[in-house]
Amino acid sequence: WLSGLRRTTGNRLCVNIAPRDQIPNSTPEFRRNRKNAADFSTQKKTVPRMEIGAFWDAVLWQDAEGMRAFFWPDARVDWPNTGERFTVAEFLHANCEYPGQWEGEVERVLSLPGEIVTVTRVWNRQKTASHHAVSFFQVREGRIAALEEYWGDDGPAPQWRQAMHIGRRIGED
């Protein structure tokens, strides 16, 4: 149930964890039927997993065909920050035509039955721009049925908050 262990840019460790209902001996059926545990364990249901690291690699390489393989044809992508909804084809077009070349790292992954949440830092190769994306993936049979993303620019706190002399930069504790 643990797969996809690898090091990413910045030497971070990325781990893909199967949703709880795919981990042996953790399903509701198993817990209700503990007396039949030996029989139940032989009836594993194989469900394709969404390889989130491979998806983000395709995004960063702006690889349209690589990304397309992760989506159901009728999937939708929402960017609430700008009020946009895309079809898969429109999302691929927007991503692949975005100016520049990009690198990034998945900083956090939360995997739930049917849903994956990632926090990903993305920066251009010249290191003049940096962003964070929080992405909510609705996954069905190992492919994206819906994606909702919130993108924000990395940078200093706004001047009005700096003037208040509150808080400190993350990592300066």
Image (spheres, grey):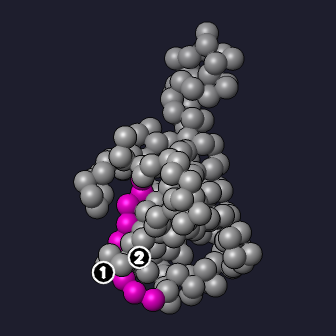
Circle 1 residues within 10 Å: few <14, some 14–19, many ≥20: few
Which residue is at a point 49% across and 86% down the rendered structure image?
A: 98
**Residue name at image x 74 percent, y 75 percent:** 83
Asked if the residues shown at circle 1 and circle 2 are in contact, with their CB atoms under 8 angstroms apart, the answer is: yes
Front in this rendered view, residue 172 or 125: 172
Q: Residue 75 placed where, x, y %?
A: 68, 70
User: The residue tagged with tag 2: helix, strand or loop?
Assistant: loop
Q: Mark 1 points at which residue?
A: 126
Q: Which quadrant of the rendered structure holds the N terminus?
A: top left
Specify the amino acid type for callout 1: Gln
Say whether residue 141 is visible.
Answer: no
Confirm whether residue 110 shows in the render: yes
* Residue occupied by mark 2: 129
Instruction: Look at the image and give the residue range highlighted in magenta.
Output: 99-107
Could you say where residue 59 lies in the image, as x and y percent from the top left?
Answer: 46, 73
Residue at the farthest left position: 11
Determine whether 76 is above or below 140 in the image: below
76 falls in the magenta region: no
